[in-house]
Every structure is written in C-alpha cells, then in structure tokens.
Amino acid sequence: MTFESLCMGCMQDRGSEENCPHCGWREGNPPESPLQLPPRTVLDGRYLVGRALGQGGFGITYLGWDLNLDRKLAVKEYFPRELCTRGRDNSTVQALTQKVKDTYGVGLTRFLDEGRALARFQDHPGIVAVLAYFQENGTGYIVMAYVDGLTFGEYLEQRGGRVSFEIALNTLIPVMDTLNQVHAANLLHRDVSPDNIYITRSQQVKLLDFGAARYAVGEQSRSLDIILKPGYAPEEQYRSRGRQGPWTDVYAVGATLYRALTGEAPPPALDRLAHDDLEPPSRRGVQIPAASETVLLKALALRQEDRFQTIAEFQHALIETSRAPDLSIVRQPEPPKPREDARKKPEKRRLLWGIAFAVIALCVGAVLVRILGEKHPAIVSFTVTPTVVSQGGSVSLRWQTRDSNEVLLDGQKVPLSGERTKANLLKDSKFTLTITGPNGVITSASAAVEVKPPLLPPRILFSVFPRRIESGKSVAVRWDVQNASQVFLDDQLVPNSGSKTISGLTESRNFNLRVSDGAGKNIERSVAVAVQIPRHVVTETPPVPKPAEPSIERPSISFRGDHEVITRGQSVALHWSVTGATRVHIVPGFPVLAPAGTVTVSPSENTDYLLLAEGPGGSASKQFSVRVLSPALPSSVPLSIIAFSASPTAIPEGSSAVLRWDVRGAARVTISPNIGVVGTSGSLTIRPANTTLFTLVASASDGSSIAQQLKIIVSPR
C-alpha cells in the first residue's frame, strides 16, 4: 500500500480507484465542514489526517494514519467553535477576537494537560489509549488508538431506545470501575453520557472524551450550551463556582442509567431546581427492583450532599440491591371474588387462599433469588500490545474477566486476570481467550497481531548523464530505489523507480534524492552537473580591449568534523566557515547554509561530505570523510531522553538560542514545531519569532515512544 493509494475515508488500500471499494470515499473530497482540516494534512511530520469522525462544540476527531508504524488511529483536535476559527491556510487555528484569546489559551493548556494525564492510563482496558499529544497550527492534538464499534447511545437506538435493567447495569459496571481509578488519580470526567461510552466489537466498554479542558473554558465562558449536556450535568456544573467532585460524575452515571431504562434523559438540572418533576422509572413501566430504584434516585439528587459521594458507594449499592430478592417487580394476581355458594364457609376459603398466596410468594421469591443472584461471566478486557511487530519481536497479552470459573488462553489454563508475553513471533498471529461460567456458558474473545518482515536497508541507484554539458543542453536523471517507503527528487514525491529529462540548463546545479526507509529515517544522495558556456570563434576584428578589472579571489573555506570514525547510531558535528561566497551548501543533505555554522549528522554508512562554496570569484570545495563502524553487539539500551535543553531559554525578539539533545535507544527522534527528524544527539541554532513550546518525541523500533517539552520565551525589544 502506497501513500497515494491510502483511502482517507477508511485508511485501507483503494488501489488505483477514485472511489474506494471498501467505503465509497472519493479521492479529492473536501472536508464536510470548512472548519475541519483538509484530508491528507500531515501533523507533527508523522500523522496523516483523513475524514472527520465527529465534531462537537469543543473539538474535532479525525481518522488518522501513523506514517511511521503503518497503523490506523484517531486524532483529536482542540477546536472550541465559539472561541476560534480556521485560518486561510486551512490549517492554522486562531482565537476569534482578542477578547477571548486568553480564554482560548487557558483551554488549550488544559486540553494538553488532559492528554498528559490520560497517557498514564494507556494500558487501562476502560480508557482509549493516548499515544501522543503535541501543539501545532496554533492549537493542540491528542493522538489515540483507533477502536471499532459504536457508542452506547447508538446501541440504545438499535434496541428501540431503551434496554432492560440487567443489560444497562452490565454496561455501566465497567464504566464505574474506570471512574473509580480515574477519581483515585484526582481526575474527573465531567461529561459522562451515552455518547461518551463506547462498546467495541470485542464487547469492551471504554470511556471517551474527558473534560479537563472543557471545564477550564467553562470557568471563563458563558457559552454553557457547548460545554454541558442537558439532562446529564448536575446543577453545580452550571455555576462558575459550583463545588465539583466524584459526586458530579455520580449524577452523570445515574442520568445515563435513567436514559437507558426509560428512553429519555432526566429533565435538565436547572429545570428541576424550579420544579422537580423527575418520574421514577417504575412509573414509566420499567421493571426494576424497588431498592435499586431508590439507589438510582439518590444518585440523581439535586443537592450534591444528598447524593452518593463516590462512584464506589453508588456501584456497591446498585450491585447489592440488584441481587437481593425483591417482589415489587412482579405484579401479584388479584384473588378471584368468592362465589355465592362459597359464603357458607368464609373461614375455610380464607385459609385456602392464604396457603395459595404463600406458596406463590415462595416460588416467585426462589425464582428471583436464582435469577438476581446468578453470576454473569464476562471478558472485561483482552488486549495485545503492540498490534504490529517486526519478525522475531514480542507482544504483551493482558486480560481481565468477571464471574468466570475457568479461563483458557489458546487452550492453556491461566489466572482469571493477568498478563503473558509471547516472544519470537514469526508470522501473523491470533490469540483467543475463552472463559467458562457457573452454568457452563462459554464466552471467547480474540486479539490479533501483525508480524512484518525485518526492515532491509534501502538500495539506491542514482545517476545523472551527462555530468558536464554546454549551456542550454539537457541531462537525464535516473533512479532506482528498493526497500523504501517514500522517494523525493528535489523535494518532489516520485515513484521508487523512474527517469526524468531536464532541458535547457543554463547554470550548474545539484540534483538531490531523498529516501525514507520503513523506520522513518531519511537517506540523501546528491549529484552535481556542471554547465559550461561555449566559446565562440572570433572571425571579425576583435574589439578594443577594456582596461583590466581587478581580480576577485575565490572563496576561502574552513571545513572539519569532530570525529573521523564513529559507530553506527552515533553522531558527528560538522563545522565550517566560508568567506567570499554567495552560496554555501553541503552534500549530501544541506542545500542552503549560512557562511558559517555547525550541523550534526548521523550517517549509517561511510559518507564523504563535500562543502561547496560559490562566489563572484569562482567556486571552491572541501571534503570531510566519516567512517562508520558497525556496533559490536545489538543495542539493548532502553528508550530514554538523557537531555533536552536550550541556551538561553529566554531571548529578546530577533535573537538566537541553541537547542541541545541526547537520546538513547531511539530509532527515530523528531522535534516540533518546524524542525522535524533529527539525530539521536546534537545541537541546532534557532531563531523563534515568538514564545514557542518545543516537543521532542523519541520512538523505539517496537512502536513505543516518549516525549519531553521545552519552552523558549521571546520578549519584545
């Protein structure tokens, strides 16, 4: 599958078809809204954006693709539509007015804080994993794992708008388990509703869209219609100084349960303050134990002090009352009226009816005890991490079950919950978890991992013929690249193999070929063509010679490196100083340079670096060769950021600062914004126009990554 054939509607290979055969998406379709990013936008130099999955008042979620790891994901963009707009470049986001600029900025900070906080729950089965978060285009982005399924709201619509008490409770128990751990980390959700509960195809229940940033905007904005969902938000969320806590999420979970049972959300909390007309579910024909209904109504109490103070209390009360026998959910038959001839023996009739009712009550009670006390085996979660590995790699399997008698992983007995490592994978694999319940009920779930062949180094053939021509002539550029993901000729994307004729060259130039391998590493090749001006034979009387002009000296060059021999994976700094030149460049890799400076390179093979200087007096060059040795042993260094600093961290407008970094165990290192892929260690002189938050992301070959941020403050002169 190539970059061009990737469908922006489903991220599958559409081949050469304009309309995707999988989803019908037509290549070139504009976004559904002008407020959305155009399809094929690339963020952080790595994440390809497709169609929008959803847009709310606070953000936009897109289908995405990781260009480095070749996997589908979801990208959430901070976009509070009442506070900001999209720029003319279709990418930049900016505050609508100067008045709301500070509010927008505070919300952005909280949005990134949300990503940072949720990254701690990456392995939690009840929360969609956060893979990365960063700032770009004047806004923020959170990259999440892609999960396939439907929301609880969509599930309810499929079931006619409402479900039984048992189904609703079984769906919300994993949600409450998740909230218990989130609250233990001093976080609140603040937006629990059927639309933010997701049921995957493997029957996992996950909680979406945490509202840390939403709460920040709510503190400073009156646009509460885009912040709160009427019916699910308690009254304290409508007040700027309302005291919020776990009891706030208790109300929202209770409102979600009420909606699942009755088909409608409770009346908005502000309406209930004026006149509380909340009907108990039983009055609307819902079959629910009376004790459980009392628990639900307590969770929906208007005053926060009248509710359960923690999710754990609410969850425990619901489970206990649902298992207790409760005859109020069964309508008892009315006794028939006595016949006229039976009035002679009223006492005997009463005795017989009493015995009959006692027997009925005992039978019904026994049935209810059996039904409500029955265990319901379930696979709470079953995941494999990562889902894509190289041949010979390892994955981690994690599972959690409930009320199961026996658990089998690929036919082998394992604990009810646990973790296993599968090593030395040689082909695509599918793992199956099977559980057996008390009544012999068998449930299973599967998790698959894709095994890719080991990455081979790119093989590059690049030539230009002829290398020396007269002005106005043509040259043929040919290339053939294997084992590469993308190929660029002079920064233009081209097929992996091809040729091109360049006509009418009037001056010398370099042709540059840039190749990206499967790990995202760039390799560059450069070929120079010299153009000569033809000499004409003089047949007429030569003109009177002009006075000789003063000679202009050729450029003077100083060019050296810190090391001549390095081990693969190490870096070397190249230093240069040139006088008398109008153009300076180093091949391969650096087409435009200042007259003096330093760059850091990490060649993977023996490389000759050639410094070329061109000026009025001619051209000059100097070469520095780097010999690259293979490491003695395979690297087993854990992924870590040793250093990421700036000197200085506060500068006047128009001044420069030097970024320095040192990363261990990484296959790819990027710095954003505007810098891109760098070596595993080095330094770079930058001149930011305004205060900028730089983010260094280090990615290992197994797909894991870590990040560190650094702010450089720019003050006006």
Image: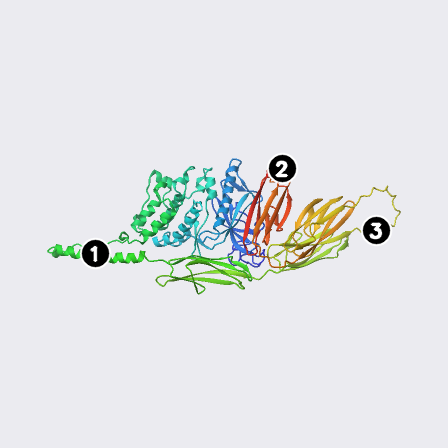
C-alpha distance separating marks 3 and 2: 54 Å
Q: Residues within 10 Å of mark 1 (few under 14, many from 20)?
A: few
Q: Which residue is mark 3?
A: 536
Q: Quadrant of residue 655?
A: top right
Q: Which residue is mark 1?
A: 358
Q: Residues within 10 Å of mark 3 (few under 14, many from 20)?
A: few
Is any atom of residue 597 visible in this view?
A: yes
Question: Which amino acid, by three-letter code, is at mark 1?
Answer: Ala
In-front residue for pair 309/534: 309
N-terminal of the two: label 3 or label 2? 3
Say what secondary structure mark 2 lies in. loop
Task: Residue 364 in the image: state x and y as whole percent.
Answer: 26, 57
Question: Which amino acid, by three-letter code, is at mark 2?
Answer: Glu
Which label number is shown at residue 653? 2
Tell me the colour scheme of the image.
rainbow
In-front residue for pair 148/459: 459
N-terminal of the two: label 1 or label 3? 1
N-terminal of the two: label 1 or label 2? 1
Q: Nearer the viewer, mark 1 or mark 3?
A: 1
Q: Is residue 515 left or right of residue 288?
A: right
Quarter of the figure that contains the C terminus: top right
Q: Nearer the viewer, mark 3 or mark 2?
A: 2
Quarter of the figure that contains the N terminus: bottom right
Q: Is residue 474 left or right of residue 215?
A: right
Is any atom of residue 54 visible in this view?
A: no
Question: Which amino acid, by three-letter code, is at mark 3?
Answer: His
Q: How many marks?
A: 3
Q: Quadrant of residue 390?
A: bottom right
